[in-house]
Image (cartoon, helix red, strand yellow):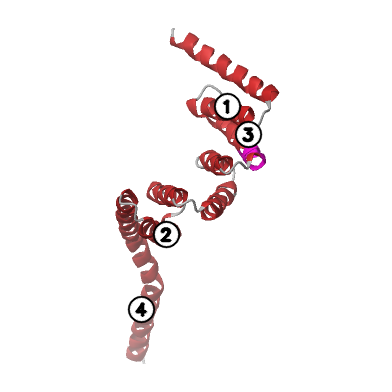
Amino acid sequence: MRIKMKYRNVACWIVAIAFGFAISSPVSAQISILPTQEAATEGLVDRLNQQTLDLTLQEKYEEAAAAAEHAIEAGEPILGLSNPALAISFDRLLTVYHLQKQYDKAEALLLRLIRSYDSTPNETHPSLAPSLSRLADLYREQEQYIKAEPLYLRALSIQEKRLGANHPAAISAIETLANLYKATDNPTQAQQFLQRLNTLRQQGKTNLR
């Protein structure tokens, strides 16, 4: 009787170990595989980014766009939008769209990025202001100044809060707005931003002394 109980206990112990292994192994494997998967994906994205650049320089824009889109499709689910390699993919795809004058595609991509950056909890995503400015540039190029103005203003507000009013990015945003208001025959607003620009530049010269 004791022998039967002994074997029964051993059997239960073996089953318990097997059951525990079945549950824990996939998690352990996933943890060990994940860094490798991320590294492999980033390597693929880097290669596709270089391919996109090469094809763009050869003016093979359709093939360049396909390479950049492939990089985004492969990289975004694993690396996320904040990954530097993937940021290059988006930038080069936008460049290709711009060179092809595919403004609708560029607009849609920028709006998607802005919505994603806007959803970042608790803090402003560092790529939000540049994306807003790039979309504003797109509208300005098409003389859609009414759409461009609020985007430039928001980008400026973000840059000033994140980086400070004296930061080159903020100063550049002020200069862009001054030029926008001059182009739209709004001399009062243009003068206000030019005054701000001159004040900041004078402060910069003073700080260098």
Q: Which of the two labelled residues, at mark 2 and mark 4, occupies the earlier sequence position? A: 4
Disc 1: which residue: 174
Disc 3: which residue: 153
State the SS at label 3: helix
Under mark 1, the amino acid is: Ile
Q: Which of the two labelled residues, at mark 3 and mark 4, occupies the earlier sequence position? A: 4
Q: Mark 3 against mark 4, which lies toward the viewer?
A: 3
Measure the C-alpha gap from mark 1 to mark 2. Answer: 33 Å
Which one is in front, 63 or 19? 63
State the SS at label 2: helix
Which residue is depicted at the point 36% across and 56% down?
A: 64
Q: Which of the two labelled residues, at mark 1 and mark 3, occupies the earlier sequence position? A: 3
Disc 4: which residue: 18
Q: Is residue 195 left or right of residue 83?
A: right
- Residue 109 appears at what percent x and percent y? 52, 53
Q: Mark 2 against mark 4, which lies toward the viewer?
A: 2
Residue extending farthest top: 209
Range drawn in magenta: 146-151
